[in-house]
Image (cartoon, helix red, strand yellow):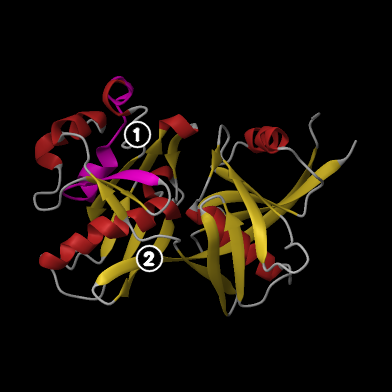
Protein backbone atom coordinates (compact mmCIF):
# COMPACT_ATOMS: atom_id res chain seq x y z
CA UNK A 1 0.00 0.00 0.00
CA UNK A 2 1.21 3.50 -0.85
CA UNK A 3 2.50 5.68 1.95
CA UNK A 4 2.73 9.41 2.59
CA UNK A 5 5.95 10.61 4.24
CA UNK A 6 6.09 13.49 6.67
CA UNK A 7 8.60 15.44 8.76
CA UNK A 8 7.97 16.32 12.39
CA UNK A 9 9.03 19.72 13.73
CA UNK A 10 8.78 21.69 16.96
CA UNK A 11 7.79 25.26 16.18
CA UNK A 12 8.20 28.57 18.02
CA UNK A 13 11.17 27.15 19.88
CA UNK A 14 14.90 26.74 19.25
CA UNK A 15 15.12 23.41 21.08
CA UNK A 16 13.57 20.01 20.53
CA UNK A 17 10.60 18.80 22.57
CA UNK A 18 9.33 22.29 23.34
CA UNK A 19 7.10 24.58 21.30
CA UNK A 20 4.26 23.27 19.16
CA UNK A 21 4.68 19.98 17.26
CA UNK A 22 3.87 20.01 13.55
CA UNK A 23 3.77 17.37 10.82
CA UNK A 24 4.52 18.48 7.26
CA UNK A 25 3.86 16.30 4.22
CA UNK A 26 5.96 17.65 1.32
CA UNK A 27 4.77 16.69 -2.17
CA UNK A 28 2.69 13.73 -0.95
CA UNK A 29 0.81 11.46 -3.37
CA UNK A 30 -2.49 12.86 -4.65
CA UNK A 31 -4.83 13.02 -1.66
CA UNK A 32 -8.40 14.18 -1.24
CA UNK A 33 -9.34 16.57 1.52
CA UNK A 34 -10.98 13.70 3.37
CA UNK A 35 -7.79 11.62 3.17
CA UNK A 36 -5.74 14.53 4.49
CA UNK A 37 -8.16 14.89 7.37
CA UNK A 38 -7.82 11.19 8.25
CA UNK A 39 -4.02 11.47 8.29
CA UNK A 40 -4.16 14.60 10.45
CA UNK A 41 -6.53 12.89 12.85
CA UNK A 42 -4.21 9.89 13.08
CA UNK A 43 -1.21 12.07 13.96
CA UNK A 44 -3.34 13.89 16.56
CA UNK A 45 -1.23 17.06 16.55
CA UNK A 46 -2.46 20.64 16.76
CA UNK A 47 -1.99 20.87 12.98
CA UNK A 48 -0.65 18.93 10.04
CA UNK A 49 0.35 20.51 6.72
CA UNK A 50 0.20 19.21 3.16
CA UNK A 51 2.36 21.33 0.86
CA UNK A 52 3.12 20.91 -2.84
CA UNK A 53 5.75 22.36 -5.14
CA UNK A 54 4.54 25.27 -7.28
CA UNK A 55 2.96 24.41 -10.60
CA UNK A 56 4.87 25.33 -13.76
CA UNK A 57 5.07 29.10 -14.04
CA UNK A 58 3.89 29.65 -10.48
CA UNK A 59 5.87 30.69 -7.41
CA UNK A 60 3.52 29.91 -4.51
CA UNK A 61 3.47 26.51 -2.80
CA UNK A 62 -0.13 25.20 -2.48
CA UNK A 63 -0.62 24.58 1.24
CA UNK A 64 -3.47 22.98 3.18
CA UNK A 65 -3.62 22.96 6.98
CA UNK A 66 -5.64 20.53 9.11
CA UNK A 67 -6.28 20.12 12.81
CA UNK A 68 -7.44 16.71 13.98
CA UNK A 69 -11.03 17.69 13.19
CA UNK A 70 -11.13 20.47 10.58
CA UNK A 71 -9.29 22.34 7.84
CA UNK A 72 -8.01 25.85 8.60
CA UNK A 73 -7.63 28.73 6.12
CA UNK A 74 -4.55 30.01 7.93
CA UNK A 75 -2.41 29.18 10.96
CA UNK A 76 0.81 30.57 12.32
CA UNK A 77 2.90 27.65 13.53
CA UNK A 78 2.22 25.63 10.34
CA UNK A 79 3.35 28.64 8.28
CA UNK A 80 6.59 29.10 10.24
CA UNK A 81 7.30 25.37 10.47
CA UNK A 82 6.65 24.66 6.79
CA UNK A 83 8.93 27.49 5.68
CA UNK A 84 11.73 26.34 7.97
CA UNK A 85 11.40 22.74 6.77
CA UNK A 86 11.49 23.71 3.08
CA UNK A 87 14.69 25.64 3.79
CA UNK A 88 16.21 22.76 5.77
CA UNK A 89 15.44 20.42 2.85
CA UNK A 90 17.13 22.82 0.43
CA UNK A 91 13.92 23.41 -1.53
CA UNK A 92 13.92 27.17 -0.86
CA UNK A 93 16.57 29.60 0.34
CA UNK A 94 15.72 32.86 2.09
CA UNK A 95 12.02 33.18 1.26
CA UNK A 96 8.92 31.29 0.19
CA UNK A 97 5.28 32.04 -0.62
CA UNK A 98 2.69 29.61 0.76
CA UNK A 99 -0.72 29.61 -0.93
CA UNK A 100 -2.99 29.03 2.07
CA UNK A 101 -6.76 29.20 2.23
CA UNK A 102 -6.63 32.84 3.34
CA UNK A 103 -4.41 33.79 0.39
CA UNK A 104 -0.72 33.90 -0.49
CA UNK A 105 1.43 34.25 2.63
CA UNK A 106 4.97 35.57 2.12
CA UNK A 107 7.58 34.14 4.48
CA UNK A 108 11.21 35.18 4.93
CA UNK A 109 13.74 32.71 6.34
CA UNK A 110 16.88 33.43 8.34
CA UNK A 111 19.66 31.24 9.68
CA UNK A 112 21.76 32.17 12.71
CA UNK A 113 24.23 29.46 13.62
CA UNK A 114 22.27 26.26 14.16
CA UNK A 115 18.95 28.10 14.49
CA UNK A 116 16.55 28.65 11.62
CA UNK A 117 13.69 31.11 11.95
CA UNK A 118 10.90 32.33 9.72
CA UNK A 119 8.85 35.52 9.59
CA UNK A 120 5.53 35.85 7.82
CA UNK A 121 3.42 38.86 7.04
CA UNK A 122 -0.29 38.34 7.58
CA UNK A 123 -2.53 38.79 4.57
CA UNK A 124 -4.61 41.34 6.44
CA UNK A 125 -4.30 43.77 9.32
CA UNK A 126 -5.94 42.87 12.64
CA UNK A 127 -9.69 43.36 12.38
CA UNK A 128 -11.81 43.99 15.48
CA UNK A 129 -15.31 43.07 16.61
CA UNK A 130 -16.92 43.29 20.03
CA UNK A 131 -16.31 40.55 22.59
CA UNK A 132 -19.01 39.13 24.86
CA UNK A 133 -19.67 40.66 28.26
CA UNK A 134 -16.62 40.61 30.56
CA UNK A 135 -18.50 38.63 33.21
CA UNK A 136 -19.23 35.88 30.68
CA UNK A 137 -15.58 35.77 29.63
CA UNK A 138 -14.41 35.58 33.23
CA UNK A 139 -16.82 32.74 33.97
CA UNK A 140 -15.78 30.94 30.77
CA UNK A 141 -12.16 31.08 31.97
CA UNK A 142 -13.07 30.09 35.56
CA UNK A 143 -11.79 33.35 37.06
CA UNK A 144 -13.30 36.44 38.66
CA UNK A 145 -14.18 39.58 36.67
CA UNK A 146 -11.83 41.54 38.93
CA UNK A 147 -8.94 39.43 37.58
CA UNK A 148 -9.35 40.76 34.05
CA UNK A 149 -6.92 43.51 33.00
CA UNK A 150 -7.93 46.82 34.61
CA UNK A 151 -7.17 48.98 31.54
CA UNK A 152 -7.35 46.78 28.44
CA UNK A 153 -10.64 45.35 27.22
CA UNK A 154 -11.24 42.02 25.51
CA UNK A 155 -12.05 41.93 21.82
CA UNK A 156 -12.45 39.49 18.98
CA UNK A 157 -9.48 40.07 16.69
CA UNK A 158 -8.58 38.37 13.43
CA UNK A 159 -5.85 38.37 10.79
CA UNK A 160 -7.68 35.63 8.89
CA UNK A 161 -8.80 33.47 11.83
CA UNK A 162 -10.70 35.00 14.74
CA UNK A 163 -9.77 34.80 18.43
CA UNK A 164 -11.33 36.30 21.50
CA UNK A 165 -8.29 38.00 23.05
CA UNK A 166 -8.89 38.41 26.79
CA UNK A 167 -6.28 40.52 28.67
CA UNK A 168 -5.81 39.45 32.28
CA UNK A 169 -4.33 41.16 35.33
CA UNK A 170 -1.17 39.05 35.55
CA UNK A 171 0.46 35.70 34.76
CA UNK A 172 -0.68 34.16 38.04
CA UNK A 173 -4.30 34.64 36.96
CA UNK A 174 -3.47 33.23 33.53
CA UNK A 175 -2.00 30.08 35.09
CA UNK A 176 -5.29 29.43 36.88
CA UNK A 177 -7.53 29.73 33.82
CA UNK A 178 -9.60 26.71 32.84
CA UNK A 179 -12.41 26.56 30.33
CA UNK A 180 -15.83 26.16 31.90
CA UNK A 181 -17.40 24.12 29.12
CA UNK A 182 -20.94 24.78 30.31
CA UNK A 183 -20.46 28.54 30.03
CA UNK A 184 -18.51 28.15 26.80
CA UNK A 185 -21.17 26.02 25.10
CA UNK A 186 -24.00 28.30 26.28
CA UNK A 187 -22.48 31.66 25.38
CA UNK A 188 -19.46 31.27 23.08
CA UNK A 189 -19.79 28.14 20.96
CA UNK A 190 -20.69 28.90 17.34
CA UNK A 191 -19.89 32.60 17.83
CA UNK A 192 -16.90 34.68 16.75
CA UNK A 193 -15.62 34.39 20.32
CA UNK A 194 -15.39 30.60 20.54
CA UNK A 195 -11.56 30.56 20.36
CA UNK A 196 -10.33 31.96 23.69
CA UNK A 197 -6.89 33.56 23.91
CA UNK A 198 -6.28 34.91 27.45
CA UNK A 199 -3.12 36.96 27.68
CA UNK A 200 -1.27 38.65 30.55
CA UNK A 201 1.64 41.13 30.80
CA UNK A 202 4.96 39.89 32.17
CA UNK A 203 6.50 43.32 32.77
CA UNK A 204 5.52 46.94 33.23
CA UNK A 205 6.75 47.91 29.77
CA UNK A 206 3.98 45.75 28.26
CA UNK A 207 6.37 44.41 25.62
CA UNK A 208 6.44 40.81 26.92
CA UNK A 209 3.27 38.78 27.47
CA UNK A 210 2.21 35.24 28.29
CA UNK A 211 -0.81 33.60 26.68
CA UNK A 212 -2.84 30.42 26.53
CA UNK A 213 -5.13 29.29 23.71
CA UNK A 214 -8.28 27.23 24.10
CA UNK A 215 -10.15 26.03 20.98
CA UNK A 216 -12.60 23.35 22.03
CA UNK A 217 -14.34 23.37 18.65
CA UNK A 218 -11.06 22.50 16.90
CA UNK A 219 -10.53 19.50 19.13
CA UNK A 220 -7.82 21.36 21.08
CA UNK A 221 -8.17 21.48 24.85
CA UNK A 222 -5.13 23.80 24.74
CA UNK A 223 -2.54 24.74 22.13
CA UNK A 224 1.12 25.33 23.09
CA UNK A 225 1.85 28.00 20.44
CA UNK A 226 -0.61 29.76 18.14
CA UNK A 227 0.85 32.22 15.65
CA UNK A 228 -2.53 33.14 14.17
CA UNK A 229 -3.79 34.07 17.65
CA UNK A 230 -0.62 36.02 18.42
CA UNK A 231 -0.99 37.99 15.19
CA UNK A 232 -4.60 38.75 16.04
CA UNK A 233 -3.59 39.80 19.57
CA UNK A 234 -1.26 42.43 18.09
CA UNK A 235 -4.36 44.50 17.42
CA UNK A 236 -5.21 44.53 21.10
CA UNK A 237 -1.61 44.96 22.22
CA UNK A 238 -1.33 48.08 20.08
CA UNK A 239 -3.91 49.60 22.44
CA UNK A 240 -1.28 49.39 25.17
CA UNK A 241 0.47 52.33 23.48
CA UNK A 242 -1.67 54.65 25.56
CA UNK A 243 -0.17 53.13 28.71
CA UNK A 244 3.47 52.71 27.71
CA UNK A 245 5.85 54.08 25.09
CA UNK A 246 7.93 51.97 22.79
CA UNK A 247 8.03 50.25 19.39
CA UNK A 248 5.05 48.25 18.24
CA UNK A 249 6.63 44.86 18.77
CA UNK A 250 6.08 42.23 21.43
CA UNK A 251 7.19 38.78 22.57
CA UNK A 252 4.43 36.37 23.52
CA UNK A 253 5.22 33.27 25.57
CA UNK A 254 2.80 30.37 25.31
CA UNK A 255 2.69 26.72 26.32
CA UNK A 256 4.44 27.31 29.65
CA UNK A 257 1.65 25.72 31.69
CA UNK A 258 1.70 22.71 29.34
CA UNK A 259 5.42 22.08 29.76
CA UNK A 260 6.06 23.10 26.14
CA UNK A 261 7.37 26.67 26.38
CA UNK A 262 7.14 28.64 23.18
CA UNK A 263 8.16 32.12 22.06
CA UNK A 264 6.31 34.06 19.38
CA UNK A 265 7.64 37.41 18.18
CA UNK A 266 5.07 39.82 16.73
CA UNK A 267 5.31 43.34 15.32
CA UNK A 268 2.70 45.65 13.86
CA UNK A 269 3.49 46.59 10.25
CA UNK A 270 2.18 50.06 9.51
CA UNK A 271 1.42 51.97 6.33
CA UNK A 272 1.52 55.57 7.46
CA UNK A 273 -0.67 55.84 10.54
CA UNK A 274 -2.69 52.71 9.78
CA UNK A 275 -1.81 49.12 10.56
CA UNK A 276 -1.48 47.14 7.35
CA UNK A 277 -0.46 43.72 8.65
CA UNK A 278 1.34 41.87 11.43
CA UNK A 279 4.80 40.33 11.21
CA UNK A 280 5.07 37.03 13.10
CA UNK A 281 8.46 35.42 13.73
CA UNK A 282 9.64 32.24 15.36
CA UNK A 283 12.23 29.49 15.34
CA UNK A 284 11.64 25.84 14.46
CA UNK A 285 13.61 22.61 14.67
CA UNK A 286 13.20 19.31 12.83
CA UNK A 287 12.83 16.41 15.28
CA UNK A 288 12.03 13.40 13.12
CA UNK A 289 10.22 11.87 10.18
CA UNK A 290 7.83 9.08 9.39
CA UNK A 291 5.28 7.69 6.96
CA UNK A 292 1.62 6.68 7.10
CA UNK A 293 -0.29 4.34 4.84
CA UNK A 294 -2.68 6.33 2.68
CA UNK A 295 -6.30 5.77 3.74
CA UNK A 296 -8.86 4.56 1.25
CA UNK A 297 -10.46 7.32 -0.80
Residue lying at 35% horizontally and 34% vertically, measured from the top left: 194
Say which residue label 1 marks. Answer: 194
- Mark 2 or 1: in front is 2
Q: Position of residue 153 (x, y in %)?
A: 15, 48
Residue lying at 72% horizontally and 63% vertically, measured from the top left: 54
Label 1: few (<14), some or many (≥20) within 10 Å? many
Against 142, residue 175 (above or below) is: below
Q: Position of residue 282 (x, y in %)?
A: 48, 65
Question: Which quarter of the figure is the N terminus placed in?
Answer: top right
- Residue at far bottom of view: 113
**From where the camera sits, is residue 139 visible?**
yes
Q: Quadrant of residue 193?
A: top left
Image check: 117 left or right of 96? left
**Disc assigned to residue 79:** none
Q: Which segment is the magenta one?
A: 162-185
Front residue of this view, candidates 168 and 217: 217
Q: Quadrant of residue 3?
A: top right
Alpha carbon separation for disc pair 2 and 1: 23 Å
**From where the camera sits, is residue 266 visible?**
no
Against 252, residue 135 (above or below) is: above
Q: Quadrant of residue 206?
A: bottom left
- Mark 1 element type: loop
- Residue at far front of view: 57
Q: Contact, CB < 8 Å: mark 2 with mark 1?
A: no
Q: Position of residue 109 (x, y in %)?
A: 57, 73
Front residue of this view, candidates 194 and 19: 194
Say which residue label 2 marks. Answer: 277
Label 2: few (<14), some or many (≥20) within 10 Å? many
- Mark 2 element type: strand
Against 133, residue 180 (above or below) is: above
Q: Position of residue 36 (x, y in %)?
A: 69, 38
Amino acid sequence: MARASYHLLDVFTDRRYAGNPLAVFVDPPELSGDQMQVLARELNLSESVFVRSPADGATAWPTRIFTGSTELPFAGHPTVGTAVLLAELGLVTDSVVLAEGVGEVSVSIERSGATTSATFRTVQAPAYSDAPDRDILARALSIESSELHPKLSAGVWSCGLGFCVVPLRDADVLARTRVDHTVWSEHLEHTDAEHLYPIAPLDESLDRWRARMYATDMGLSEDPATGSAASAAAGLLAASRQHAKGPLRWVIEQGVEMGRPSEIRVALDTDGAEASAVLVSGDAVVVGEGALEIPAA
